[in-house]
Amino acid sequence: MTITHTHGVDTTPDPVRWPDVVRVPAGPLARWGAPIADRLFRRAVSRLDVRVEYPDGTVLGAGGSSSPRMTVHRPDAFARRLAGGGLIGFGEAYMAGDWDAPDPAAVLAPFAASAPGLVPRPLQVLRPLVLPGQPAAERNSEENTRSNISRHYDLSNELFALFLDDTMTYSSALFGETPARWDTLAAAQHRKIDRLLDESGVGPGTRLLEIGTGWGELAIRAARRGATVRSVTLSVEQQELARRRVADAGCADRVRIDLLDYRGVRGEYDAVLSVEMIEAVGYEYWGTYFATIDRLLVPGGRAAVQAITMPDARMRASRGTYTWIHKYIFPGGLLPSTEALEQAVSGTALRTVDRFGFGGDYADTLRLWRERFAAHSDAVTALGFDATFRRMWEFYLAYSEAGFRSGYLDVQQITLTKEGAR
């Protein structure tokens, strides 16, 4: 299957690298289910502010000519993928070029806003029978977690540098009242980090543990406040670059970066920070995650966790489902709900003292990343990533942006304190 040709370059998916993108489902479920999936999709879009165009001239959607436009190029393949894989099939259809959109995030936002009702309730009970469950090999046990993390974060430091700002911060910025532009992104990332440091009381002499290093910017800013920082990561690529950035910043004597699972950390800390790492922990281990923070934090100490959250009902309905994000982007993860986080904390001596949401800022952050990624497509190719990877990454960023722009997803900074006096 050939998607398209861009500047004379063949963009046919590699059948070894992308077998499920090349192969259109042809089993009984796909064949018999395709007409049903097609009807359900058409029924869903008829109520959404989108414009869906088909090769035969059919136009669907509740919106008008100015609504976000989606073009279905291969209706039969698109329907078979939906029938055979649900949302996995929807994402693979984009990767294969079965459908396209000038602005995928704008198209996906109405779908995200209406997610609970897209599939009729009587059919939702069939989800476990039709859709695959998460593979046991991707459960975030101590044996599996390093592999799961490596599949995303060890892709290439150079790849991430192409679309992140100079701080190399891969989490939501906090723009506040500042216009969300590329030239304000680094300052907005610092604003986000500084709020976390303030909330956890990081200053001179603070013994700080960071769970999830990223590329070191938080550790550097904490060290410049006079803190002694230990940061742990499971990404070899991140550890290497973060150490170099810390050294270049003149903070190597105050920052230690270890390749270590958070469950293996020992010692006592005055503050614990963790930014958008809990999403990769896995449902079964949220209690372990907060119990670890509780164990490591001194009485009276404070922790600040930045977490992406989703509605509780949707989290519970989908927590056992294998999704496109699991398969191609973040194996083994799950976005928690606010209620699930509170339940996981309840078995510890930690108490929530502040919760701050800024999901709209994440939509803007992702938009800037997506624009930057698209602007550097030639550089992505030069790093060895093919056209299918570029479409996959574009879909990932657009899919994520749509979740926040619709309000389906939120991002929160949660401040915790451990009971007892210092």
Image (cartoon, helix red, strand yellow):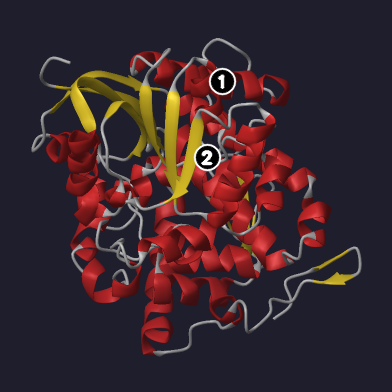
Question: Quick check: 390 above or below 11?
Answer: above
Whether pointer 1 and pointer 2 mark residues with C-beta atoms closer than 8 Å, the reply is: no
Q: Amino acid at mark 2?
A: Glu
Considering the numbered disc 1 on the image, is that residue within a helix, a strand or a loop?
helix
Q: CA distance from mark 1 to mark 2?
A: 21 Å
Can you give x and y, in whole percent of width and height, for residue 311 in the image?
27, 40
Q: Amino acid at mark 1?
A: His
Can you give x and y, in whole percent of width and height, for residue 41 in the image?
43, 61
Question: Quick check: 215 above or below 361?
Answer: below
Q: Residue at x 52, y 41 (%)?
A: 214
Residue farthest to the top?
A: 177
In screen coordinates, is 148 left or right of 418? right
* N-term-proximal mark, 1 vs 2: 1
In screen coordinates, is 130 left or right of 101? left
Q: Nearer the viewer, residue 414 or 180?
A: 414
Mark sitting on residue 298: none
Can you give x and y, in whole percent of width and height, for residue 251 in the image?
59, 27
Mark sitting on residue 401: 2
Question: Quick check: 44 above or below 193?
Answer: below
| Residue that label 1 marks | 190
- Residue 53 in view (yes/no): no
Q: Residue at x 61, y 49 (%)?
A: 240
Q: Residue at x 17, y 16 (%)?
A: 422
Q: Residue 265: which quarter of the image?
A: top left
User: How many residues crowd around disc 1 within 10 Å: few (fewer than 14), some, or many (20 or more)?
Assistant: some
